[in-house]
């Protein structure tokens, strides 16, 4: 299992458009991808699960990848967050 922590910089947080893009990125990998915020977690491959976290600007989240391609997933998702959120 690999993880990283990221603080959301997008002024409206993880809203519909970037959440959809994140789901598509997470689905590129076989491993499980989970986003954690304030003791709650969401499957990053499911849009409504991810949106249900209510992530706002300034919130810190932890992204976790667990499985065969977790190293590649963490690298790609970290890059995704830096570029989009």
Image: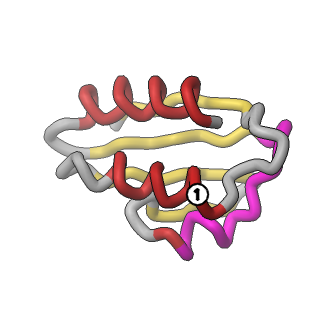
The way the protein has been coloured in the rendering is secondary structure
User: Quick check: is 8 in the magenta stretch?
Assistant: no
Q: Give the position of the N terminus as an image quadrant.
A: top left
Which sits in the foreground, 69 or 17? Answer: 17
Which sits in the foreground, 78 or 67? Answer: 78
Horizontal side of 4 relative to 73 (left or right) equals right
What's the residue at 77%, 32% (across, down)? 9
Image coordinates for residue 18, horizontal then vertical, percent:
57, 51
Horizontal side of 77 relative to 11 (left or right) equals left
Image coordinates for residue 37, horizontal then vertical, percent:
69, 52
What's the residue at 62%, 63% (across, down)? 16
- In the rendered view, tell whether residue 62 sits above or below residue 54: above
- In the rendered view, tell whether residue 26 sits above or below residue 68: below
Q: Residue furthest front?
A: 17
- In the rendered view, tell whether residue 23 sits above or below residue 64: below
User: Quick check: is 55 in the magenta stretch?
Assistant: yes
Image coordinates for residue 46, horizontal then vertical, percent:
43, 69
Horizontal side of 59 relative to 72 (left or right) equals right
- In the rendered view, tell whether residue 43 sits above or below residue 65: below
What's the residue at 45%, 24% (across, down)? 79
- Could you tell me how many numbered marks the image carries? 1
Q: Give the position of the C terminus as an image quadrant.
A: top right
Image coordinates for residue 36, horizontal then vertical, percent:
61, 51
Predominant SS along the magenta part: loop
Residue 40 placement: quadrant:
bottom right
What's the residue at 84%, 41% (across, down)? 11
Residue underneath mark 1 = 17
Q: Residues within 10 Å of mark 1 (few under 14, many from 20)?
A: few
For the magenta stretch, what is the residue range?
48-59
Horizontal side of 52 relative to 80 (left or right) equals right
Q: Secondary structure at mark 1?
A: helix
């Amino acid at each position: 299992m690999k993880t990283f922590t990221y603080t959301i910089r997008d002024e409206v947080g993880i809203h519909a458009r970037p959440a959809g893009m994140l789901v598509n990125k997470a689905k590129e990998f076989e491993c499980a991808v989970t986003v954690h915020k304030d003791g709650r977690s969401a499957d990053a491959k499911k849009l409504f699960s991810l949106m249900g976290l209510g992530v706002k600007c300034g919130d810190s989240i932890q992204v976790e990848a667990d499985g065969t391609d977790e190293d590649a997933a963490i690298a790609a998702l970290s890059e995704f967050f830096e570029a989009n959120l």
